[in-house]
Structures are given as structure tokens and as C-alpha cells.
Image: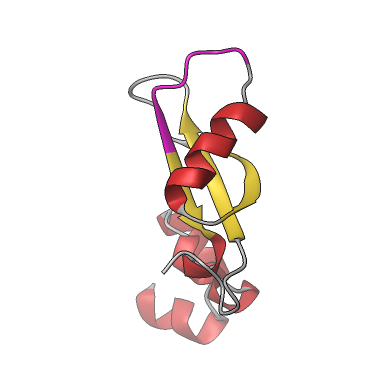
Amino acid sequence: ESLGSLGKPVMYEIYHLQKRGKQHIHAGNLSASSPEEAMSLAKKQLNIGKVIYNIWAIRTASIRFTSPEEEDLWLTLPEKKNSAMPQSIKAVIN
């Protein structure tokens, strides 16, 4: 469902791909009644004068954001994981 509970437009996050082989980057957000309308508006409002290879329009309410308490999900390097662990756990690992 693209519309809010009262039939009003909802917020969409817009990501675009400027160079093949790279990641999509956040280009902004906008209010629209459907993903198709969001993509059309993005083309008009966020035109940066460069070739865009792909656009994503994602309903903001559908994105699950991480909380500060989940920071350890992103500590992927072993030295970062080890330094973030409590001393009692470090002792068991080492």
C-alpha cells in the first residue's frame, strides 16, 4: 500500500546509481502517492545533470533503521570486535 491511512501521500527515500559497479547513494526524500510517482518526482526534483543508471524509491516507513544499541552489528573487523568486547569476554577469547 502506497498511501497513508487517510489517502495522503507518504514519504519515500530516493537512492540513485550514478556509476555502474558502484553502490546506490541516498539522493533525498520526497512525498508521493506511489513508488512510480516518487520516481517521476525524483527525476524532476533531484536532477543533478549527470547520467543516472538506476533509481530506487523506498517508502520511508518500510525501512528498518538500526538503533545505537545495535552498533555491534556493524563492527565487522576482528580488531574492532575485540576492542568493543567487555574485558571478561576478551579474557576467554585470548
Using the image as rendered, state which of residue 27 and residue 83 is in the foreground.
Answer: 27
Region rendered in magenta: 49-55
Using the image as rendered, state which of residue 61 and residue 85 is in the foreground.
Answer: 61
Residue 10 horizontal side relative to residue 39, left or right = right
The image quadrant where one finds the N terminus is bottom left
Residue 89 horizontal side relative to residue 68, left or right = left
User: Can residue 44 be seen here?
Assistant: yes
Using the image as rendered, state which of residue 14 and residue 67 is in the foreground.
Answer: 14
By secondary structure, the bulk of the magenta-drawn segment is best described as: loop
Residue 79 horizontal side relative to residue 26, left or right = left
**In the rendered image, the vertical position of residue 38 relative to residue 53, given as above or below:** below
| View extreme (bottom): residue | 88
User: Can residue 64 be seen here?
Assistant: no
Position of residue 7 measured from the top left corner of the image (x, y, whole percent): 57, 71
Residue 54 sits inside the magenta stretch:
yes
Residue at x 47%, y 76% (from the top left corner): 90
**In the rendered image, the vertical position of residue 71 relative to residue 69, given as above or below:** above
Position of residue 61 measured from the top left corner of the image (x, y, whole percent): 54, 69
Position of residue 86 measured from the top left corner of the image (x, y, whole percent): 55, 81
The image quadrant where one finds the C terminus is bottom left
Residue 87 sits inside the magenta stretch:
no
Residue at x 55%, y 29% (from the top left corner): 43
Quadrant assignment, res 60: bottom right
